[in-house]
Image (cartoon, helix red, strand yellow):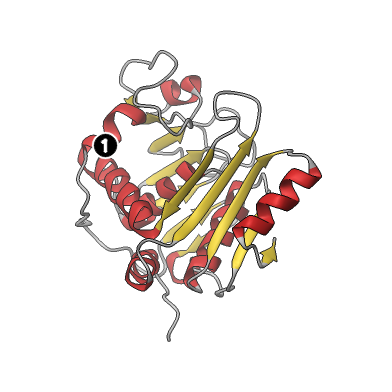
Amino acid sequence: MTSPTTVPAVLARLVGSDPGRPRITVYDDTDGPTRGERVELSARVLANWVAKAANLLQDELDAGRGTVVRLDLPPHWRTLYWALAAWSVGACVEVPAHRTSAARSEVGQAPADVVVTDDPAAAEEAEEGVLVTLAALARTAAVPVPPGVVDEAKEVATHGDVLAAWEEPAGHDPALRDGGTTPYAALVPVPEAGRVHTATGDTAAFLRLALAAWAADGSVVLTRGEPAADVLRARLESEGVTRHA
């Protein structure tokens, strides 16, 4: 079977292959409100989140081809669907090298049009800000939402489950900026099969790893924080992990 080469094709292949199969599983051992969570998204549920976030980007923030969406989030399941949503509408995802002053792009680059972040201050200083609450069951932000900022936990669920993108990106359009620039034609990496485990703190690397696994009809297990070695070993065994990255 030919490997998909675009993000919409990757998602369609996952849903068509086995819509109920887990594609991203996250164990959270970080300090804070998400500690102890285990979240698993099937292909169908992932595609649903992507469509809702993409419709929010288009309908509320006029995001599309050429829009720069600055993704100021750690490796997380929510980060995945926001990146996929931005790519689904033809935007360029920008991942900051350092998670400070999120509304400002790196030296020599244009400022972001939209900032998707879990930091209220970064959302407030953006031209268009989306405040993300990482907790799985959140239905509204746990902190005050600055005026003019979209409360993702409250708003994203109100958007449609089906996406009709206004315009498709060209292959030479920028898709990912993380120090360098990756065009859409090279966004989906060489497929790497298996159920892959990662504990990376590098958001751009996490996005690439997920795309490579999904392009091969695989899945990802992300561990956040530092669980005890025996706990981690038992988790990965129970998850059927076949590869580590």
* Vertical comparison of 150 with 235: above or below: above
> x, y percentage for residue 51?
28, 51
> x, y percentage for residue 224?
64, 41
Lateral position of residue 164 relative to residue 227, left or right: left
Lateral position of residue 60 relative to residue 244, left or right: left
Which residue does the image show at 42% across and 68% down from the upper left?
172
**Residue type pointed to by label 1:** Ala
| Quadrant in which the N terminus appears | bottom left
Of 51 and 92, nearer the camera is 51
* Displayed quadrant of residue 194: bottom right
Which residue does the image show at 73% across and 44% down from the upper left?
231
The answer to whether residue 181 is seen in the rendering is: no
* Vertical comparison of 139 with 202: above or below: above
Farthest residue in the top direction?
Answer: 144
> x, y percentage for residue 131?
41, 28
> To which residue does mark 1 refer?
157
Mark 1 lies on a secondary structure that is: helix
> x, y percentage for residue 97?
63, 42
The answer to whether residue 25 is seen in the rendering is: yes
